[in-house]
Amino acid sequence: MGELKDPRVKLTITVDEDVLKMAKGKAKECGITLSRAIEKFLKFFADPHVYCFKCGEKFRVSEAEICPKCGWLSCPSCSACRCDLSEETAIAIFHMRRVYEDLLVRRIK
């Protein structure tokens, strides 16, 4: 019987020393390996997903359409977008979305 091959590959990266120290500490605090944290981020980076603010459904950004009126993603399940929100709620969601954009170093979609 053939030996199962590990699908993982080795990755060499260079990061700021202080960032690495903080990340190692946070990974240990969360009970995960740094490799696992990097893998989860890379998976999200390659194929981001979000949750609908209205129905709570998780959906891939790549599968969502952009509302031509407001420019926000439309939920594939309930079609909710910025048009369905009050100004105050839209501002709050916009600033929370900026966290994702900061992580991804680009706009979502």
Image: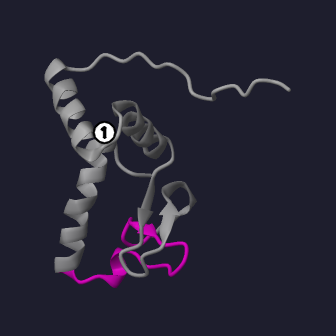
- Is residue 89 rendered to the left or right of residue 38? left
Q: Position of residue 78 (x, y in %)?
A: 51, 81
The one of 21 and 76 positioned closer to us in this rendering: 21
Q: Quadrant of the N terminus?
A: top right
108 w.r.t. 32: above or below: below
Q: Is residue 76 magenta?
A: yes
32 w.r.t. 2: above or below: below
| Res 63 → quadrant | bottom right
Q: Position of residue 97 (x, y in %)?
A: 28, 59
The magenta segment: 68-87
| Res 68 → quadrant | bottom left
The one of 98 and 58 positioned closer to us in this rendering: 58
Name which residue type carries label 1.
Val
Q: Secondary structure at mark 1?
A: loop
Furthest residue in direction front, as rendered: 1
**Residue drawn at 26 percent across, 20 percent down:** 15
Tag 1 residue? 105
- Is residue 76 rendered to the left or right of residue 25? right
